Image (tube, rainbow, N blue to C red):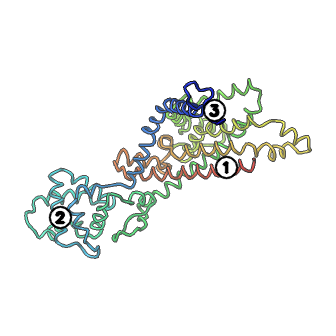
């Protein structure tokens, strides 16, 4: 009775105070959610949906299932050992005739050409000639029209087309593909390029990240130890590149690094080199330009952590007999590791997706994975390959972030 009286107390309408507080909190949460709803919708529309669509396209392709329904259905009973029987060829003739009438033979040829290079033209030619066939036998007639239909590879491909989902694009992105019996085999060496491209992307990204760390750490330390007036002035110089676009900064490096550019002229005037050095359209130009662009992204997180480190820590170590370097290395530097990890991770992840800078200042052997994503998107219109490459890049980024989060979490526990 005393508890009930206490709940009713202070509530003129007789409603328990606990319930009224819950309603107030619920209204507050609803109001807060209303304020952030536009941002959530923007993130959903601009980021989540496109990424989800990309991941879906990497494993989904219903071209053959949609455009060749009779053939894919007839292949359900094919054992895959010899060529299919007459009924399957009859279904193929019907599908090709229909495709020629609906002008979809090109789409079929393009899809088959992805896995069997050179087959696209034969499919289009077969569709045109198949439309003139009135009666069977279709097997001999179609093989005579094009030797393509006498190969088991194409029939294995068409049978895999019975499913709207395929692992072909993801396999091709790591230099694997389907063999004649639908087994997974390594891509031919002359066509195996993506593993080298991924390794090149990782190598350039690691190299640029290390250079930004070596250049940015001393500057961050200087900014953190200088008086505020001088530090703020130098900070303006550090963030000044953010006021110009990446395209402008990259173009500036094209001017500086060309054979008769400023850099070569200065080096020759100082007699360091006797003839212009090759500084552009190669790996050197790519790394230099990317390092310049990425330097603030590595420097600023390190600087933000250094500003929170009390100088009394180093003074205490010095007063206890430690030398300048020992005090810095054992006392100051370990406290900067979270900033170093955050800056390097941010810079490395940004480097993985570089496209414009390598395209402008790099050579053919310096293009990173983003170049091939753009190529398949804009030129080949192969959305499956572009999506698969993007998914692998996204997966690598998420794994890096997961590892970083684990390491930082362990460090925090140790510090705690």
Tell me residue 244's x, y (percent): 54, 29
Q: Which of marks 3 and 1 is nearer the N terminus?
A: 3
| Label 1 SS | helix
Q: Residues within 10 Å of mark 1 (few under 14, many from 20)?
A: few
Which circle marks residue 409 in the picture? Answer: 1
Secondary structure category for the residue under label 3 = helix
Residue drawn at 41 percent across, 50 percent down:
387
Q: Which of marks 2 and 3 is nearer the N terminus?
A: 3
Quarter of the image holding residue 42?
Answer: top left
How dense is the environment of label 3, judged by Cα within 10 Å: few (below 14), some, or many (20 and up)? few
**Residue bearing the label numbered 2:** 91
Q: Say whether residue 309 is left or right of residue 151.
A: right
In the picture, the disc for residue 90 is: none
The numbered disc on residue 5 is: 3
Of the 4 image quadrants, the one containing the N terminus is top right
Q: Earlier in the sequence, mark 2 or mark 1?
A: 2
Residue 151's spot in the image, x, y percent?
Answer: 26, 70
Q: Against 254, is 129 above or below?
A: below
Q: Residue furthest front?
A: 1
């Amino acid at each position: 009775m005393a508890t009930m009286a206490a709940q009713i107390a202070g509530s003129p309408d007789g409603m328990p105070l606990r319930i009224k507080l819950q309603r107030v909190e619920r209204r507050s949460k609803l109001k807060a959610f209303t304020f952030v709803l536009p941002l959530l919708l923007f993130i959903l529309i601009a980021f989540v949906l496109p990424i989800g669509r990309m991941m879906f396209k990497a494993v989904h392709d219903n071209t053959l299932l949609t455009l060749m329904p009779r053939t894919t259905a007839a292949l359900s009973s094919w054992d895959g050992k010899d060529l299919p029987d007459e009924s399957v060829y009859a279904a193929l003739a019907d599908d090709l005739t229909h495709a020629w009438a609906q002008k979809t033979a090109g789409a079929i040829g393009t899809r088959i050409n992805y896995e069997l290079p050179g087959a696209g033209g034969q499919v289009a030619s077969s569709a045109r000639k198949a439309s003139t066939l009135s009666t069977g036998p279709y097997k001999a007639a179609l093989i005579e029209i094009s030797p393509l239909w006498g190969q088991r590879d194409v029939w294995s491909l068409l049978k895999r087309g019975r499913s709207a989902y395929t692992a072909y694009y993801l396999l091709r992105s790591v230099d694997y593909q389907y063999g004649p019996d639908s087994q997974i085999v390594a891509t031919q060496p002359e066509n195996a390029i993506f593993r080298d491209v991924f390794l090149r992307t990782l190598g350039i990204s690691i190299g640029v990240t290390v250079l930004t760390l070596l250049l940015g750490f001393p500057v961050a330390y200087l900014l953190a130890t200088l008086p505020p007036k001088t530090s703020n002035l130098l900070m303006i110089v550090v963030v000044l590149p953010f006021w110009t676009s990446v395209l402008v900064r990259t173009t500036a490096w094209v001017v500086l690094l060309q054979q008769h550019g400023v850099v070569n002229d200065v080096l020759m005037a100082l007699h360091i080199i006797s003839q212009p050095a090759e500084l552009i359209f190669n790996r050197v130009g790519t790394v230099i330009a990317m390092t310049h662009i990425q330097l603030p992204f590595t420097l600023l997180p390190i600087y933000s952590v250094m500003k929170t480190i009390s100088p009394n820590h180093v003074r205490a170590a010095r007063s206890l007999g430690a030398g300048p370097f020992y005090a810095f290395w054992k006392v100051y530097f370990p406290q900067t590791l979270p900033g170093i990890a955050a800056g390097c991770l941010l810079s490395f992840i940004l480097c993985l997706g570089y496209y414009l800078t390598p395209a402008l200042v790099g050579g053919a052997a310096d293009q990173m994975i983003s170049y091939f994503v753009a190529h398949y998107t804009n030129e080949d219109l192969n959305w499956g390959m572009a999506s698969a490459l993007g998914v692998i890049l996204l997966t690598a980024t998420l794994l890096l972030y997961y590892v970083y989060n684990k390491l930082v979490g362990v460090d925090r526990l140790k510090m705690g």
